[in-house]
Each structure stands twice: as structure tokens, then as C-alpha cells.
Amino acid sequence: ISSSQCVMDHHQKLPKHQQRRRRRPAPTSTTSISTSTSKRPNVVLIMADDLGFSDVGCFGSEIETPNIDELSANGVLFSQMYNCARCCPSRASLLTGLYPHQAGIGHMVHDSGIHSKAYQGYLRDDCATVAEILRDVGGYKTLMSGKWHVGGEYPPNDPDHWKKHAGDKTHPIPVQRGFDEHYGTLGGGGSYYDPPSLIHNRKIIVNTPNHYYYTDAINDEACRMIREAIKDEEDSDDDDKEEKPFFLYVAHTAPHWPLHAPDDVIAKYRGRYKDGWDKVRERRHAKLMELGIIKDEWKCSPRDENSFPWEEAKHKDWEDARMATYAAQIDVMDRGIGRIVNTLKECDIFDDTIIIFLSDNGGCAEFLREDGGEDGSWCENYGTVASDGTQTVVGNNPERIPGDCSTFMSYDLPWANASNSPFRLFKSWVHEGGISTPFIFHWPNGIEHPGRIHHKPWIMLDIVATIYDVAGVKYPKHYHEKNIPLLEGESFLRVLTNSNNASRHRPIFWEHQGNRAVRQGRWKLVNRHEDDWELYDMDDDRTELNNLAQTEKGRVELMIEMWRKWAGRCEVRTWPLHTIEEGDRDWAHVPWLW
């Protein structure tokens, strides 16, 4: 199949589905599903990339996301859902219901060179993905459109590497880990016009057609997969054949850098950000309080210490253009989610389908220097030639306006600080700004009292456990003749069906690049690498401004010990993983200098 066919040939006339469709009886569930239907639902799991806590409308943003907002208005909005702070560790957890180290991605998708499965950089073979369990145990059809990023490294400028390694032992691809079909990218990011490591099942796609835009392709491919899943059932000759529900994982790269978006959508937002990031933070904080997502007594965190007042910005029109492009990326993603919703409705399966929306981490403070960084910097690898012959120039150069394929920029730390309003810090850290995600669970036939906000803390590992619960799938002790870890996630089905005050039983833990945290009920213990532990009462102070570590020393010691036991069980290593040479620095913790 050609790259153009992958995207362009699936906008044909839709089949009409007038009759309610049969569902096979669910296997015995570990939890009683007291819902308006006993049918096993389809599941559409949508994840944005580097989207901050307040970057969509229903979470206080000025960015227009009517389709996401509609899902929230008719579902359950979780105000304290957490991710795992970084793209690939979060994806590993989301796909397995385990902590990132247990899934093989304790840091990133390169082999960390410390002879540890926890840091091997690709999904471990002694864990099972949600696609594998739903397909092989639950009988679901399993589909994926979008970013993989849990299967080794894919240099963005080396197609020969993609072709050679995709699917080998250290580069497992989706169709080897439980997905019946996959269209998308294998690596972490890149051009939206010529996405590197693009693949359909096992076929690498190097060149993209004119007018290609990856966010649209992800959403359109998702729509095609839904239609074909339904059509396959309709075309069956066996009238008594039991229907397979489907699981569809829609993994966006938006709004991850680079700042690429259609001109007309960027134009819609130009001028909206000329009063700067400080005003955006103020307005979003106020809107979050108005919506009831955060408490009035939670003060907005101060402007980040590495940011600066808007009045001191030297290139205000360019800064407006950067944030307008970022907003446009989210806007386009939302429009595509609307197409997915419409496809479900046209196929008469909307009410029987769960739709979940979240982000993999907080807003991203990575800079991308205008000179490509130091000699041999990873940034330089993105300076490729587009399919139409255009040279891509990497870097945040104020003399160029972002948006088209000739540019490769980020929106930078001050705007990321606004994305994460009202919280502290960014992607990669485990203070609230790095790990708090907007989260929406929509299920017309399953949610009792939709349109509400749930305020208890959960983490993305719990999503898989909940999917198994609603699907009636029992998680096995063994898979492919190997013992697999017990699920770390806990089902929150009871939140959806009968108890808005239900909470997680076990504490939640984090570690990424030496940033550590544990959340136990109302208490959160957290530290930034090389800093002291901090303790916060999250009921009174979720923006982490009043450190109680000195007055609650006994609690601090108990929670440190809890964290240490968890770290030992999950094979967490001390950061840095390798000795930093004298005169060098730990670049992982200064992304605003990249």
C-alpha cells in the first residue's frame, strides 16, 4: 500500500448501520458492572503528546477544543489523573498497566548501557500489553493509529536504520505486541509534514504526499479502522458469528514540537497571545477555579524561575506566533477527534463505545537552539529535506515565523509554564506541572450521572485495569509461557458507575531522571533531582507552595521508606545512570538550554 493510499483512500461513502449490533457475552468480570448495558464496549483511547494540564477548553484554556469539551460535558472529568512525566515512560505504562521500569523504559528508548531490563529502551518480553491481553484473552480486535515510541531508537534522519531495525529484537513494533493493525510512527517525534519512521504494519513509508499533515492522518486512519472493523462484521457470511468489539489506540504527536500547523488555523490564533504568558496563566487559573476543577484557595504558582516577565520579551510578535502555532496544533487534533466521534455515530456504535482522552506529560520546556546546539547535538538530526525538497532548519530563530516545513521550533519554557497553569515545573519533573494530565472518560451506556468532576488521585496505570474490568477480561498470571508482573493499576470502574468519592487503595510512585515522588491520599512527597524532599498537603495546597517537610518529619521518613521499597521492587537505579565527567553537566535537567 502506498503512503498516499494510507491516508487518502479512506474517505469513501460510509456504510449505513441501522440495526443495533450483537455483542458476544462477556467473560466473568472481577467487578460487577452495574450499567445500563451488559454489552462489552468498544474502546477508543486517545493520547495527546506534551499537552499541558490547562491546554484544552474544559480545563480552562482559551484554545478552542469543542469536541473534547463535549466529551467532558457528557462524561466524567478527572481533576487529579496523573501520567509518568515523559513521553515513552508514560506510553509504556499506559500500554501495560505497570510502572515504566517494569515495562522496560525506566528512562528513554535507548539502551542505557547498564545491563538492566528496566532500562533497555523497549518493551520487555516479560510483560504484556493491553492489546495482547484484549486480543488473545478477551477476543477484541486491536487497532492503533499514531506514535509508538516504546520500541527502541529511530534516528529521524536515517531511513535505512528504520528499514533495517524495525521489528528486530530490540525494536518491537505494534503488530508484534498485540495490535492487528498499526499506522503511524515508531520514534518519538519529528516533522508533521514528513514524519520520520512512518510505517503501516510492517511497511516503512519514506515519502508522504502533498498536503499531508500527520495529525490529520492519525485521525483519518483511526476513522478508517473503525469503518473497516464494522464492515468486516457486516460482510461475514455467518449470521450467528459473535461480534468482536474493538480497542483503538489513537496516539497523537500533537502538540509536541516542532511547531507545525496549517496556515489558516494558525491565523485564527494570531494576536490572541500578544498580552503574554503571564496573562494567560492568570486567566487559566481563574477559569479552572470557575469550572470547579481546582479549589479557590490553591494559589497559582509563581512564574518559573527560568522564565521572565512578558514585558521583557524582545520579540513579542514572534512569541505570539509561536503560541498561536501551538494552539493551532491542538485545534487540528480536536477537529480530528470530532471526526472520530462522528464516525462512531455514523456506524451506530457511539453509545457502546468508551472514549478516553489524556496527555502523556506536562507542557515541554525544551528549547531547540537556533544553531542546532553543540557540535553533533541531537537537534541537528531533524534538519532533514522534506518530500517536496524543502530544507528544514532547526532552531528557535526570531527572524523566522514557525508553521511550515522549513522551520523546526518549540514554544519554549515561558509558554510551557502557561500550559501547565497553575502548577510548577514541566515535562520530565514529577511536581504537578510535569505529571498532571487533563483526563476525560466518556461512555454513554456505562456512566451514571455524566457531566461531573471526580477529584481523587489516580494514575494512567489504572486506565488499563479499568479497561480490563469493563471488558470482563481477567488479567493472566502468565503470557506466552512467561510469568508476567501483577497489574500495578487499579480499576476505577466504581467511580463511573456508582461512587464519585471512590479512591485508589495503594500509593502512587514516580521516578524519572532522579526526580522522585510518592502520593498517598492527601499527602505528596516529592523532590527535584539533587534537592531535598518536599512534603505537601494536596487537599490544601496542590500547587505545591507550602513545604511541610520540616514540620512533618515523621511522615517524611515513612514516605521515603515507602518510595525506597517501591524503587527496589521496580528495579529503579540511582540517577545519573553514568558518571558525569568533570566540567560537564547533567543536561537532562536543563532542557531550556538544549
Image (cartoon, grey):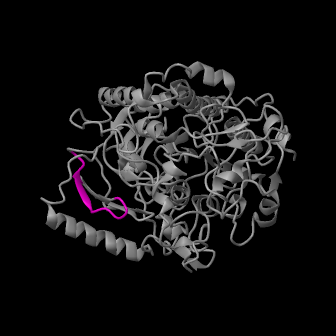
Farthest residue to the left: give it. Answer: 551
Determine whether 92 is above or below 48 in the image.
below
| Residue 241 in view (yes/no) | no
Residue under the image location 54 percent in, 78 percent down: 116
Farthest residue to the front: give it. Answer: 583
Q: Is residue 481 magenta?
A: no
| Residue 450 in view (yes/no) | yes
Residue 78 appears left or right of 211: left
Determine whether 37 is above or below 167 in the image.
above
Provide residue 355's location: percent of width, then percent of height: 53, 40
Residue 96 appears left or right of 524: right
Q: Is residue 533 magenta?
A: yes
Residue under the image location 42 percent in, 73 percent down: 574
Residue closest to the eye, 588 or 503: 588
Provide residue 434's location: percent of width, then percent of height: 42, 49
Residue 212 appears left or right of 283: right
Provide residue 463's location: percent of width, then percent of height: 47, 52
Q: Which residues are magenta?
A: 528-539
Residue 571 location, quadrant: bottom left
Residue 533 location, quadrant: bottom left
Which secondary structure class fits the magenta region best? loop
Residue under the image location 31 percent in, 27 percent down: 286
Farthest residue to the right: give it. Answer: 2
Residue 559 location, quadrant: bottom left
Determine whether 102 is above or below 417 in the image.
below
Residue closest to the eye, 244 or 96: 96
Tag count = 0
Provide residue 216's location: percent of width, then percent of height: 69, 35
